[in-house]
Image (cartoon, coloured by chain):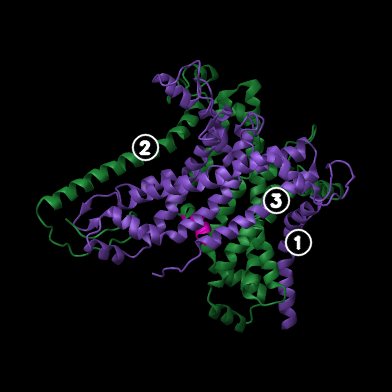
Chain colours: A green, B purple
Amino acid sequence: MSTVIHPSGDRTRPERRTPPTPAPDGLLGRSRELGGRFFNGFSHVFLVVWAVMVIYPLLWVVMSAFKDDSEVIRKPLSLIPDKLHWDNFTRAWGEGHLGAFFLNTLLVLVGSVFLTMLLGSMAAYVLSRYEFPGNRLIYYMFLSGLTLPIYLAAVPLFKGVYNTGLAFPLLGPNKHLMLIFVYVAWSLSFTVFFMHSFFRTLPNSIAEAAMVDGASHSRLFFSVMLPMSKPGLISIGIFNVLGQWNQWYLPTLLMQSVAGEPKNQVISQGLIELSVNQGYKSDWSGLFAGVTMAMLPVLIVYIVFQRQVQSGLTAGVGK
Amino acid sequence: MRHGVARFVTGFLALPVALYLFYVVWPFAQAAGYSLTSWGGYSDKQDFVGLDNYIRLFSDELIRKAFWHNVFFLVTVPLFTIALALFLAFLLNVGGREDRAGIRGIFGSGFYKVIFFFPQVLSLVVIAVMWQQIYRSDGQGLVNGLLMKIGLVDADNPIAFTADPEPFLGVPAVLWWLLLIAVWSGAGFYMVLFSAAMQSIPKDIYEAAILDGASRFHTFFRITLPLLRDTISVAWVYLGFIALDMYALVFVMTPSQGGPNHASEIFASVLNFTAFQKGQFGYACAMGVSLAIFTILLAALQLRITRRERIEY
């Protein structure tokens, strides 16, 4: 029987072995070993059950996306479609407008994530490393955005965007540029908060050395400090990509296309539309295909970068 | 030189602060202002009514209902998610075989972590639409279909899930079904979080406990859990915010976004209904301000309760 507990479940961590102690013979030792084995079995059973509960629904959705409607109704539970109906995907992509919504989401995200990272780290950098009157005030102003519910701002935000649109059409409702700015503004709170604590940890000596060499303040930021904060940038970048990809409330509020206007909606809205429409069009397989298309890219990216994504997202909570 | 710094600071802050003021601070400030008026939202008529909207909140039957539903989620979402996440993390980290080197983490823990984390990267809307299909109230739904197949559910009398207003333990059934989704999607993330925290606890503490004859259950409850206190309380705060934000599920999954018969109304759904369907913007803003005050009080209370001396290791 051994006497050391290793709480480490991660096999990549170096195992610290302690010299084994001689196991005491007799009933006590054996019953403890038996208990351990039973517990090990129980753990596996429970973990497998939960894994199935997570995977099975996902798999069911993906597989149902390949059935045709009659098969969805006839054999709703089977995980193996009779024939692979790719036409469900083309239908959701085309008639369901998911293709266009996909491009809209990408277009908005490219701009908004880049701007969020740039403006967020610029603000956080200045706030964390320069003393000036109003510093605390601005920092707490950004921080306060973390606790306020977005619904509170819904009505005035909608009105503000509508009014801006009258003067600057590109910043009005149902415009990509407007959504980019709104995403950036609403992501700044957490980005500034996170990068602020990150910039504080960077050593002063390197900054001083660069200044002695004659670097300007902005050059110091872009060529020295920003490259040094790469780990922090990756974490908050993943956080922002997922967060903005998953946005549904802001687009639902601000990206309604009135009849005749181009469809500029994002993917979440497309899904909601599909799921509401199925009430009278009952295109089940198309709906499953839509969910699959919205789900798979993120899942694949996650599986490829799972270590970064896990640590990136948990670092966000741990701060 | 001083001059250069001032220009640099202003230059770096101007754009982010401007965007933030315009799209975040200004709407919040306006909401607080509108909450004192009887503004309908579409006309220019904004009569100042003082605190009337707030007084009206207290006698509003629907708001009272929504408030208790919010409280229900506020208690149950963190409670069940954290309990399940801790249990899973416990199994992963000490569920392994006991050998000469000690009790190990379970075989395949990396694999389990990848799988359990899946729901975290899916958007709430994807999850909502997916579960809508799982919860369908006929043989086409995953759960009803399975249960009908093994004969546990009668085909003429399927489980209604999100269309079921009947109370279970005093709370409408629909809320319990929504809670299940929230726990399903959150457990994996917090398990990864707790698991990482467990691994940062130094091994010597466990060695000492084992020498004193503690079993793995003892070490978990007497050592691991108390040392995880900080992480758990942070998780509690975050899950509290998520619980206040169950609107996506209500919006996509329940009949008439808060139904059936208002059984799943929460603050956000009442607010949106009041503002955009009933056209009572002033009153809706008063709801929003109350929700904000409630949230801030709650966060402050939470931080007060969980604050205590840190154990440094």
Residue B312 occupies quadrant: bottom left
Residue under label 2:
A49
Q: Which amino acid lies under the numbered mark 1 shown in the image of this protein?
A: Ala
Q: Secondary structure at mark 1?
A: helix
Residue under label 3:
B290
Q: Main secondary structure of the magenta part?
A: helix
Nearer the observer, disc 3 or disc 2? 3
Residue A225 horizontal/vertical position (percent): 58, 71
Q: Residue furthest front?
A: B59
Q: Which amino acid lies under the numbered mark 3 shown in the image of this protein?
A: Ser
Q: Quadrant of the N terminus of chain A?
A: bottom left
10 Å neighbourhood of mark 3: few (<14), some, or many (≥20)? some
Residue B15 horizontal/vertical position (percent): 73, 63
Residue at 73% in and 42% down = B59
Residue B135 horizontal/vertical position (percent): 52, 28
- Say whether residue B178 is visible: yes
Could you confirm whether marks 2 and 1 are on the same chain?
no
Which region of the structure is painted magenta?
Answer: A311-319
Earlier-in-chain disc, 1 versus 3: 1
Nearer the observer, disc 1 or disc 3? 3
Left or right of B176: which side holds B102?
Answer: left
Q: Measure the C-alpha gap from mark 2 to mark 1.
A: 50 Å
Residue at 26% in and 66% down = B208
Q: Is residue B278 magenta?
A: no
Q: In this rendering, is residue B5 above or below B176?
A: below
Residue at 73% in and 44% down = B57
Q: Which amino acid lies under the numbered mark 2 shown in the image of this protein?
A: Val
Q: Measure the C-alpha gap from mark 3 to mark 2.
A: 42 Å
Residue A90 occupies quadrant: top right
Residue under label 1:
B18
Depth order, front residue of B54/A242: B54
